[in-house]
Amino acid sequence: GSSQSVASQDFAQLKNDLLLRAARGERVERPPCWIMRQAGRYLPEYHEVKNGRDFFETCRDAEIASEITIQPVRRYAGLLDAAIIFSDILVIPQAMGMKVEMVEGHGPSFPEPLRTVDDLVKVLDYEVDVLKELDWAFKAITLTRKKLDGQVPLFGFCGGPWTLLVYMTEGGGSRLFRFAKTWINEHPDWSHKLLQKITDVAIEFLAQQVVAGAQILQVFESWGGELSSDDFDEFSLPYLKEIAAKVPKRLAELGVTENIPMIVFAKGSWYALDKLCGAGYNAVSLDWLWNPKEATKINDGRVTLQGNFDPGAIYGTNENITKKVEKMIKGFGGGKQHYIVNFGHGTHPFMDTEKIRFFLEECHRIGSQK
Ligand code: CP3
């Protein structure tokens, strides 16, 4: 608690606050750039440091996690305007008492997913001590913030409640969403109890990440698009709104006086953009399915939009990347206000690091044009 707040005063002055200014809606000289899942997978230096170790073990080692977080900032020096702490959205289910493994070449796996009401009651009854269970995450954030030495701001993050319900009930990634859909359609009341519990943990986790040193927050509702519009309104949006409303209140209680920008990413939930722009976040991140002009029109200047380069375009030619970057930045109004450059989803393991550099350079060049 308080010792971390004291430590936060020792952090170096932020030299590049472009992203924070853009997120808050200020006019900027060029759009800030960062990439979803910029740390990891596609970076040879990541695999070198990870050295075959278990994924969650690397997250829990503050030295290693901070090193991996900084790798892309170092490699793309001057091109990235933020770092994102190396961790995972599934650390909340872990803090709620569930086992989660990361299977090499397959993805996350829960040996005991929530399939019965009894399973769910066990999780609801489990008392979560966020500071204790996620203590390693806060240490990694504090160390990373120190090592960054004010070069760029550091993102904290968490998964959206619906997305975490999916993983906790399916036991991993899914195609059919059989179990998650059974829960919300057969047991909506129990589903709401679980979503509320995840939301409570997420609020505390996000606030404590800020106390530990995070300067901006993002909520990843990666499975948003699996819900119908009505179900999104019932099982996702209210919880996303609650997070946006309660994190600042919790931060005030914890003695944080700065205004910490918050971003929401609800992948695939195109029908919800208008509502998300009024959900209490400073910025809304868009997947690549969006036409930037249409999204900008729906937003109507309310928040900052982030996105939405098709990560698949990194596989193409430089000429094609240039053309698409140009269309994207112009589509978002030129990038001098209410815009942050990002991918529409994460990097892939096979991506060429030099193509990503070219993408970032083009975003700087085109984003700086008068
Ligand atoms: O730069 C960063 O963003 C690093 C931190 C980060 C990771 N995961 C590291 C990671 C973040 C922000 C996440 C978020 C995350 N994790 C999301 C939301 C964003 C999104 O992509 O939609 C989701 C859905 C997860 C769950 C998850 N974690 C999956 C499905 C997988 C396996 C498949 C995959 O994408 O590789 C992971 C593992 C994971 N999380 C890796 C990394 C670098 C790969 C592990 C490895 O290959 O060593």
Image (cartoon, grey):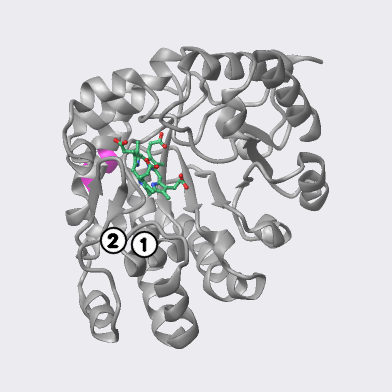
Residue at figure coordinates x 44%, y 64% from the top left: 161
Magenta span: chief secondary structure: helix
* Residue bounds of the magenta highlight: 1-7
Q: How many numbered dots are placed on residues in this image?
A: 2
Pointer 2 local density, CA inside 10 Å: few below 14, some 14–19, many at least 20: many
Disc 1, disc 2: CB below 8 Å? yes
318 is higher (above) or lower (below) than 263: above
Percent across and percent down for residue 290 are 72, 45
Q: Which residue is mark 2?
A: 93
Q: Position of residue 40 (x, y in %)?
A: 35, 30
Q: Is residue 12 visible?
A: no
Q: Is residue 310 visible?
A: yes
Q: Quadrant of ligand 1?
A: top left
Label 2 SS: helix
In the rendered image, residue 269 lying in the magenta stretch gets the answer no
Say whether residue 158 is left or right of residue 134: right
Instruction: Please state, as top left, top right, bottom left or bottom right, where the C terminus lies in the image.
Output: top right
